[in-house]
Image: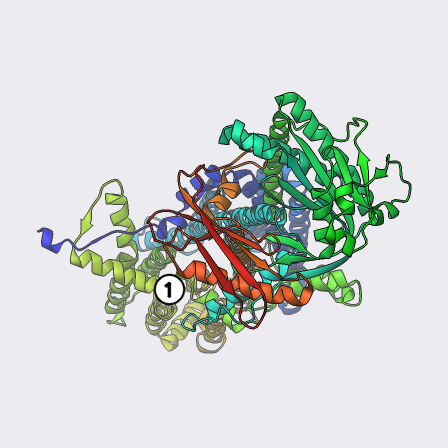
Amino acid sequence: MNVKMKCKLDYSKEIRWERNFLKKKCKEVGVEKEFTAYQMRLSANYVVVFLLLHLAFTILHCVMLLTTCEDRDKIYIDVGCYTLSTVLVTLVLWPSANPKCMPRLRYKKYLTSVLAVVFMVVTDLLLNIYHYHMDDWIIGSFFDTYTLFTIYMFLPIPYILPSLVLGISVSVIYTSYFVLYLASKHRYEISNVAHLNYLSVEISHQFCVNLYGAFFRIMREIIVRSSFLDRHQYVMEDIWLRSAREQEKVFLHSILPPQISQPIQEDIRNRIKFSEKHRNTPINIRRDRIMAIQIHPDVSILYADIVNYTYLTTTLTVKQLISLLHELYARFDLAASRYTVQRIKFLGDCYYCVAGLTRPDPDHAKCCLDFGLCMIDNIREVRAKEKLDIDIRVGVHSGALCAGVLGAAKLQYDIWGSDVVIANRLEGTGLPGHIHTSERTLQMIIEPRYEVQPGTEKARNDPFLQKHNVITYLIPFNVRPRTIPDLDIDHIKIIDSETELKKQSSIGLELREEFKKMPVGPISVKENFKEVFQLWGKDKDKERIRARPVIGIYLLHFRDPRLEYNYMHQPDYMLKYSMLLAWVFGLNLCYIQYVHDSGLVKNGVIVDLVVMLSLTVLLFLTWYKKLCFLRYSTQDHKYSRISCCLFRVAESIQRSLIKRIGIYMYTIISYFSIITVMLMDCDREEYEVVHIESKLYHYEPDMNMCFHPWLLTNMVCLIIGMSLIFTRIPFMMKVVVSTLEAITYMIILFFQFEYIVHHSLTTNPYFEAEYAHCLLVIITLLSLYFKERQTEFNNKINYKWREELLKKQHDAFIADQSITILLHNILPAHVANVYLTSLAKHELYYEDYAMVAVMFASLHNFQLDLPNLRVLNEIISEFDRIGRLSGRKDQNCGLYIYGSLWPRFAFLLSYKPREEYTRICYPGGPACSSLNFGSPQR
């Protein structure tokens, strides 16, 4: 038995289109309130559509009455009642047409809906009763089907159950009217079994219309809730990606300035896009390498070095030393942010930065000097607090430099130039607790307020400073200004928590704004005129208009064929509900055909059996998977080969547009085959003879000789409704099919069975019955068209926005990947991830290694000017490439470049003998590099 068990049931995709599941998910993610608000907006839009349609139908009906009826005196009251009813319905529903008034109406929207239905039903039935008693006219009801469609599709009733109660109540009223006025007083006796069959046909029709309305409400709720969850998911993902990208950007820009990181990111993005398009094409990583170097002609450079740092390394533990440096450098970074100074990097006890680098600043010299005094203030405060014998030397010089990154891996932002070397020499030849600055820097101070002393003797004897004619001065630290507040970690944590709360609030606000943007229907005529006039308006309005999805006006097709193709080929996970409704409608049509079967067409039973068996098979195929899920959802169950085959067939139908269209067309053809049997069952010539003789000889004819035209019209109205509501069928096709159905039926009415239709019940005195039939078909077609048009528009706009969000997410993903790759080329991957995911900016992070190998390589006789920087870039890139190709994965981790110094370290996971000293000469030039190896322990 176990051999036959083949597969497990995967219902994860289908369950996302279950109403209960969607309702539960909306509550879980907290969008139920927004869903209710959107339902109100949607109801308000449907009310507007209904009022316009109802007004148009009333005008059309009244015009036809006034132009086609022979005795107008008897129909003036009809025109007056229809007009009054339309005015009352409009006045009652008008407040519900304003979405801003909907929240205030609450239970009043139920009252207004009931009143609107009462006005329509009472007008329809009272006119029938009036003409029966006053003019001896037996007329049929006109607004029964139309009123039921209105209840379920257009009235502002938010929930299904109240709509169902109201719809059933209307059906009971019309069925009662049928019994009391048409059956008992005109032609039928209720005690007759045949007449009971006619009553059952009327009840079955009312049941199908109510079922159709309930199906529409359920499908609309499923689609809207699914759209809400999709929008919530994609917006949250977009917010998350945007937030992560912003966090990475902040982290990245704290290491690399934006003007340097952006061209590198753009190059990485282009490489990612190229690799996506050409997956099988190898990428030449050495070709067109980016060297992001910028020249800054007017900046100030500051170098600082901690005095007695060697003493600290021998007296403090590693953790104490790192904590001390962390506090000092954190204070320096806060002060640098205040004085708009860009920290370049720190190497052990050396800290250097530049003012006027990220953006031009005429006060860059003053910023550097003030920042240097602040550094001295901070280190003396820490010295007093920790009772340590430490101090700081500061050197400041103004001039030009080149800034950027070199190499192909572990990119680090650095500065080069003779003025950089001068600043470094000023720091090295300065005094602790003083700023050693150049004459050029002091000359750039507009209002000097510093105590200036002559430079040191060591600086005057420095060969490099003498070569560049640099005159130096000392600025002592005499006062203790409170330039910046203390580094209060608790205060920073409070700020972080407040920022997180504001972030959560902004996410909720953005979600609400996105939900407010969700469309409720096609663009109104007023908005169309506004957009036409705005074409000559502001550019912002033009961009907004062009940004809208381009959709056809009437058939709502995407003008982009690719987008339309993708939309149409979406899988249909609601097919089972469409097939259930189609099966019920088919059963109803077969029952009506059976009741009216006179026995002239012997193949009627065969047609009914074939139709119902085929629809039952399709119903079983589409529902079998759900039935199995309901039966075995709580247990791990494996299914037989037959069940697996049925699952695959159902999934194949769901995914295939061609198969769904085939089922759709087969269903419609099956319905019309039943109607064809009913039409073939009618002998028109015999009916005409019998009807004429009954008038001449005053006897009651046998009305079972042919079909009842109003029942046939009701059947056609249901078929039109089924043609338009079938899920995931191209809207253009549904409109064409339903229009052809209406036209075909009207041709039958006017040309083939005009005598039978003409002598059926009418809806107004002297109003030809064929006009009444055609008017009902047209009203049904247009009402259902505009209803489905609203639904299709919402579906397509949501699909278009979903595609745009997916594209935005893809672009964000590429941008995120570029930032991640860049960060991993600056820091070790695990360190970058720690800072991006779990570590706050103010927290200390360090790693302790028991045994590593450290290598320093420096270039001698190498002038760091702009032409030679390209050569240096090639040298460092080759070193990085060799580092990637050699050793194990966790070895050869480059740290950074310090001028022309290139340090690296490798984890000693496996011992490899190496030379202790090696010289490498660069071919074609005088530069040589010295490589020294050591194995320090930490």
- Observer-nearest residue: 485 or 559? 485
The residue under the point 42% across, 70% down is: 279
Provide the secondary structure element on which disc 1 rests. Answer: helix
Tell me, yes or no, if residue 472 can be seen here: yes
- Going by the numbered disc 1, the residue's amino acid type is Met
From this viewpoint, which residue is outermost toward the left?
1
Q: Position of residue 761 (x, y in %)?
A: 49, 62
- Give above or below for 41 relative to 690: above
- Observer-nearest residue: 166 or 70? 166
Left or right: residue 788 compared with residue 80: left
- Observer-nearest residue: 401 or 520? 401
Q: Position of residue 528 (x, y in %)?
A: 71, 63
The residue under the point 39% across, 68% down is: 657
Label 1 neighbour load within 10 Å: few <14, some 14-19, many 20+? few
- Give above or below for 937 relative to 61: above
Q: Picture quarter containing residue 426?
A: top right
Q: Position of residue 446 (x, y in %)?
A: 90, 44
Q: How many marks?
A: 1
Q: Image quadrant for the C terminus?
A: top left
The residue under the point 66% across, 28% down is: 487
Question: Residue tagged by mark 1?
Answer: 703
